[in-house]
Amino acid sequence: MVAAGEPAIIILAAGKGERFLASGGTTHKLDALLHGKAVLQHVLDAVKASGLPWHLVRPEGGTRGMGESIAMGVRATPDSPGWLILPGDLPFIQPASLLRVAQALKAHPVVVPHYQQKQGHPVGFQRTFFDALASLGGDVGAKAIVRAAREKREALELTLEDVGVVNDVDVVGDLGAEQLFRR
C-alpha cells in the first residue's frame, strides 16, 4: 500500500531510440532483452517494488520529445504532490534509490540524484512545478526548470550509491556492459 501524498514516478518510454537502432539494434531499445527481460520491464519491476505510484508515458507513435513526454505524464497525474521523472532506459535503477529521491522531495522543491559526481535520474519535482512541467513541449526536457531551482538554491543534489541512476541503454553495446550494471 502506498502512503498518501507520495510523488508519482513518471516513466518516459516514448522516445524513438534512434541511436540504439543505428548501432545495430533490431528492436526498440526498451523492448531489447537484457537477462531475458525487456529493458523497460526491468525499470517497471523496480518502480513496482518501490511501492510508489507511477504512470507510464508510451503513447502509440511516440511523442515529439522528452518535454512533451514529461508534460503528458504530469498532466495525467494532476493530483500528485510531486513527480519523479524516470527515463525508461535505466534497467538497473534500484527501488531504494527511487524511495530516497521521493523522501528527499518532501523537504526540497527539486531533487537531483548523482552517482560519483555524475547527474542521474529520477529528478524529483514538488507540486509547485506542475504548471512549468505540464507546459513543456518538444525535446527540451526540464533542464531549464532544474537550472532555475539551482539558482534559487531550491535544488538538492542527492548523492546515491546506485550506478543504476546514471547507466542507461543508448546503443546495443550498453546491453553487454555488465560491469556498469551491477546492483
Image (cartoon, grey):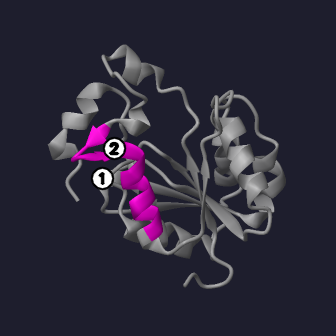
Q: Is residue 138 left or right of residue 174?
A: right
Q: Is residue 110 left or right of residue 40?
A: right
Residue 165 visible in rendering: no
Contact, CB < 8 Å: mark 2 with mark 1? yes
Q: Element under label 1?
A: helix
Quarter of the image where one finds residue 141: top right
Name the residue located 79 percent from the left edge and 69 percent from the top edge. 79
Name the residue located 33 percent from the left edge and 26 percent from the top edge. 171
Q: Nearer the viewer, residue 21 or 19?
A: 21
- Residue range highlighted in magenta: 33-48
Kindly identify the amino acid type of the residue bearing the numbered disc 2. Asn
Q: Which mark is residue 15?
A: none
| 108 w.r.t. 129: above or below | below
Q: Percent from the top left, x then y, of residue 92?
A: 32, 53
Q: Percent from the top left, x then y, of residue 161?
A: 30, 62
Q: Name the magenta segment's main secondary structure.
A: helix
Q: Which residue is mark 2?
A: 167
| 128 w.r.t. 144: above or below | below
Q: Which residue is mark 1?
A: 163
Q: Percent from the top left, x then y, of residue 173?
A: 24, 27
Q: Percent from the top left, x then y, of residue 119?
A: 44, 47
Magenta-colored stretch includes residue 45: yes
Q: Is residue 45 left or right of residue 12?
A: left
